[in-house]
Image (cartoon, rainbow, N blue to C red):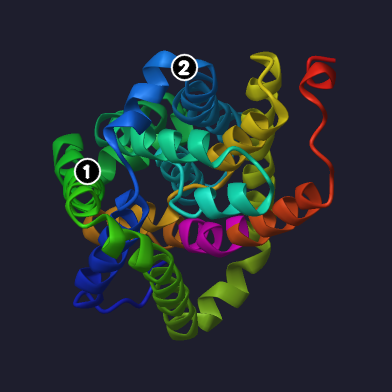
Amino acid sequence: MTVQFDPASLITLNVILALMMFGVSLNLRPADFQRVLTIPRAPVAGLIAQFLLLPLGTCLFTWVFRIDPELALGMILVASCPGGSFSNIMTWLGKGSVAVSVSMTAVSSLAATVMTPFNFALYGWLNPHTRAYLQEIAIEPGNILLLVLLVLALPLILGMVTGGRFPKLAVRSEKPLRLVSLLIFLAFVAIAFLNNVELFLARFHTFFWLVVGHNLLALGLGYGMARLMKLSVPDQRAVTMEVGIQNSGLGLVILFTFFADAGGMMLITAFWGVWHLVSGLTLSQIWARRPIPHPTEQAS
């Protein structure tokens, strides 16, 4: 099963993802990383759910229910990616802690340079149903690490440097840059869908509920871990969004670079890119209509 995709568009997709990361990091400061060290409970809860529980849970789910190897690897790849750049916006809309969300995005994006290729290779190998397929495509984790460095870590550092040197420009351009990046990304996904509409419609029943259920698992793990760590309600919302809004754009970049013929993986990853925005916006609007409990009530 092959998705029709113009290889020249890979450059566009890489630029979109880099712009998203650059826009997110314009208002990042070293203090955001220091916050993780001084008040680590929320970021630690998110990182455990993001890079340990979600990939492990995904591997077990796809193994037990014997999900088609291509679709299963697509789910494992998404689960191995860091939180998406729009988790910050969803957190803000849902009256969550934006400071925690931004800190987690920064830390998880840097951690992803190692954890994304490691988790994808590890859990793809641990699932006996995907192991043979993974060996068949024989991807070198070091190549994925280099790609993640280029499209996540480098734009993040450049964004921080630019925002630090030109703070007024950063304030004015951050939101427009995020909006333009989102619109371009959605347009990219829409064009990819139109070019493969017959394949999407023919396989819709095979990936729709997998993505919906997988996204619910991600949101549930983020929320459950935040509750377990007894975080405040705003911090719970930030952690939930960070784990539930995956960087599917990174997943698509990895796929189009290394797995151009893996149509099942692309169906999962591309639909994730749309669905998590729907679920995130829905959840943020529900939360926005709920009052934040007083600190003395939040422990109960």
Q: Nearer the viewer, residue 136 or 82?
A: 82
Most prominent secondary structure in the magenta stretch? helix
- In this rendering, would 298 be left or right of 262? right
Residue 122 in percent (x, y) is at 35, 26
Residue at figure coordinates x 67%, y 34% from the top left: 234
Vertical relation: 15 (above or below) 44: below
Give the mark nearest the N terminus, 2 or 1: 2
Give the residue number, with chain letter if any, for mark 1.
Answer: 153
Residue 185 in percent (x, y) is at 41, 71
- The picture quadrant where one finds residue 134 is top left
Span colored in magenta: 267-276
Name the outermost residue toward the front.
168
Q: Amino acid at mark 1?
A: Ala
Residue at figure coordinates x 32%, y 49% from the top left: 25
Mark 2 neighbour class, 10 Å CA radius: few under 14, some 14 to 19, many 20 or more: few
Q: Is residue 268 magenta?
A: yes
Give the residue number, with chain letter if any, for mark 2.
Answer: 40
Residue 180 in percent (x, y) is at 40, 75
Vertical relation: 226 (above or below) 167: above
Residue at figure coordinates x 31%, y 76% from the top left: 5
Q: Nearer the viewer, residue 35 or 71?
A: 35
Vertical relation: 244 (above or below) 233: below
Q: Amino acid at mark 2?
A: Pro
